Image: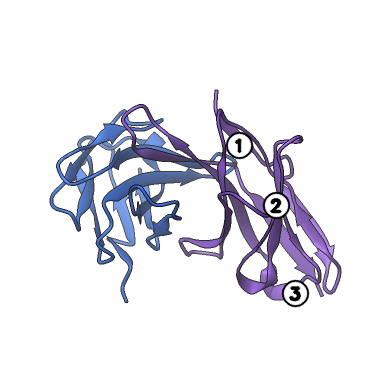
Chain colours: A blue, B purple
Amino acid sequence: NAGVTQTPKFQVLKTGQSMTLQCAQDMNHNSMYWYRQDPGMGLRLIYYSASEGTTDKGEVPNGYNVSRLNKREFSLRLESAAPSQTSVYFCASSETGYTGELFFGEGSRLTVL
Amino acid sequence: AQSVAQPEDQVNVAEGNPLTVKCTYSVSGNPYLFWYVQYPNRGLQFLLKYITGDNLVKGSYGFEAEFNKSQTSFHLKKPSALVSDSALYFCAVRIVLVSGTYKYIFGTGTRLKVLA
């Protein structure tokens, strides 16, 4: 089973460039999440989607947009990248209404120069 | 504000010794608590969770955690550490939003180093 798949795994951008991080899950989960991981700060929630067709802001949404394309896919877009967005990004999914855990992708390491 | 705290950035323990990684939380209502482990250049993996019931929860790889409501703690433990347990450990709490959806709040992580 693939679980949660993220692409790309690595990306280097210049300030002002745009890009989209892709995430897909094959567990038929309703809820999907985007986190960023920075040293000493743990994981911070950027956006989440409780179900297909809905998205909500997390703790640090500024500079990002998301799209819940269908039940499987949840993408994160940086419209104009800034050095402060250099981070490791994780997509995760879980089953809504269930006392369940999050399933994480392997991460996407983004560097903005 | 609802939060999770991991007071130690790093824990060092000798192989074969017991280990404890500390976590305290501040949430309203009954907490749903989780522990995750992250190996280098990998995503987080679920270890164990507390929802209700027995305060001692057993999980993967011989780990267990003790829920203490009066101390609002959920410490991760293992009776005998292995070098392969060396990793970054995260405590998390699940909170229910007004909309009925769920959000997970993570601690800042504790790096466990098991010395041979």
Q: Nearer the viewer, mark 2 or mark 3?
A: 2
Q: Does dot 3 land on a helix, a strand or a loop?
A: loop
Q: Does dot 2 land on a helix, a strand or a loop?
A: loop
- The CA distance from mark 2 to mark 3 is 24 Å
Where residue A9 appears, as percent x and y from the top left, is 33, 62
* Left or right: A59, with B47 as reference point: left
The kind of residue on which mark 2 rests is Asn
- Residue at image x 57%, y 32%? B3
Q: Which residue is mark 1?
A: B4
In which quadrant of the rendered image does the N terminus of chain B lie? top right
Q: Which residue is mark 3?
A: B82
Whether residues under marks 2 and 1 lie with C-beta atoms below 8 angstroms apart, the answer is: no
Quarter of the image for residue B113 reads bottom right
* Left or right: B56, with A85 as reference point: right
Please give the chain letter of the residue carrying mark 2.
Answer: B
| Residue A5 shows up from this direction | yes
